[in-house]
Image (cartoon, grey):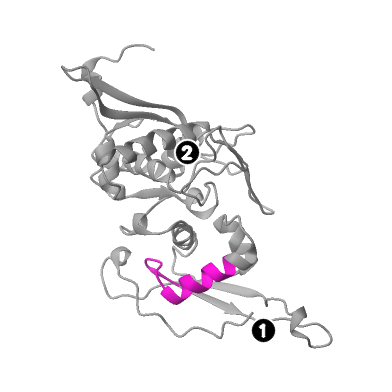
Amino acid sequence: MTAIPQGELFRLDSPLTGEIRGERSLMAFPFFALSKNAWMKPLAYATSDVSIEVRPSARGVATIYDKEIVLYIASLMASKITTGASVGQDFVFTAHDLFSVTGANHSARSYARLSDALERLQGTQIRTNIEAGGEGEEGFFSWLSEARLQYARTKSGEKRLKAVKVRLCDWLFRAILRDGDVLDYASTYFQLGPIERRIYEVARSTCADGEALKIDLATFRLQIGFQNQLSNFRIAIRQLAAADSIPGYHLRLLEDLPDVDARGRGAGRKAGRGTVILTKRITTFSNDRDEAPAPTPALPNETG
């Protein structure tokens, strides 16, 4: 590997001084596994308009927590564009600043997780028919075409991490640079659990103009990227609706009465259909992205 000039270690794009921002397609659709641990199975999502296929590397599919790095890079890029600075696909930042933004602690374990996350982001293979910057791609791409941890040596010979250097994939680079369809995130996003993060992203990308999203529970499960059974997803949505904890949005679950068999016996009961409704919170604050969740509203009867 070519030696890196010592001075290059300190040409940083960080610290991030603006807001966390993300590209709308990455908010709307399930590109990442909803897991903290390695997810080794392929992911797939398909509608009449959108198709997504995600293949794991030896370390698994990039997760919703690995996505924090992608969001950080996208935010650095968006900030450059806003200020009129020149923008390329290479970004150099410190792990310290990344952790400060995402709320991770600065422990040795966090640095080890960073290395694993970079490897998954570089190794995960994605294929989609979603065009970016007026161009489409037939083959597979990875989120990062290059990812390196840059170290310096102390006088005692100990390695000290100085910077992280990555190269953003062509697809996402075009989407941000040419399409400019980038939305800001709530400051509390990184405090949310995996499903809450995805619900927030779907709400933010589809209710941006104040319109409510009303969607069938089974269809919503696919858009969130929830890989377990629908019954488990129903339970999770009930709990989140009761907590009303999605920043900036109300979540409701409307459920039909359960079906019963022709003899009216309970053994034939099937859970009724469910409908998820996401609506933007009404607030008098000038900036509602940091608004605390409102008191839990009265929920419909939850049967089934």
Which region of the structure is painted magenta? 233-250
Q: Quadrant of the C terminus?
A: bottom right
Residue 169 is at least partly visible in this image: no
Q: Please report the residue visible at 63 percent of the width from the left and 31 percent of the height from the top.
A: 139
Q: Which mark is residue 234?
A: none
**SS category of the residue bearing label 2:** helix
What is the tally of numbered marks visible in this picture?
2
| CA gap, disc 1 and disc 2 | 44 Å
- Classified by dominant secondary structure, the portion drawn in magenta counts as helix
**Circle 2 residues within 10 Å: few <14, some 14–19, many ≥20:** many
Please identify the quarter of the rendering in which residue 95 is found. Answer: top left
**SS category of the residue bearing label 1:** loop
Q: Residue furthest left?
A: 155
Residue type at tag 1: Leu
Disc 2 target residue: 172
**Circle 1 residues within 10 Å: few <14, some 14–19, many ≥20:** some
Q: Quadrant of the N terminus?
A: top left
Sequence-wise, the earlier of marks 1 and 2 is 2
What x and y, as percent, mark residue 233? 58, 65
Confirm whether the magenta stretch covers residue 243: yes
**Is residue 26 shown above or below 208?**
above
Residue 300 is at least partly visible in this image: yes
Confirm whether the magenta stretch covers residue 216: no
Disc 1 target residue: 257
Q: Please report the residue visible at 59 percent of the width from the left and 65 percent of the height from the top.
A: 232
Residue type at tag 2: Leu
Closer to the camera: disc 1 or disc 2? 1
Q: Does 180 sit left or right of 231 as displayed?
A: left
**Is residue 10 shown above or below 106?**
above
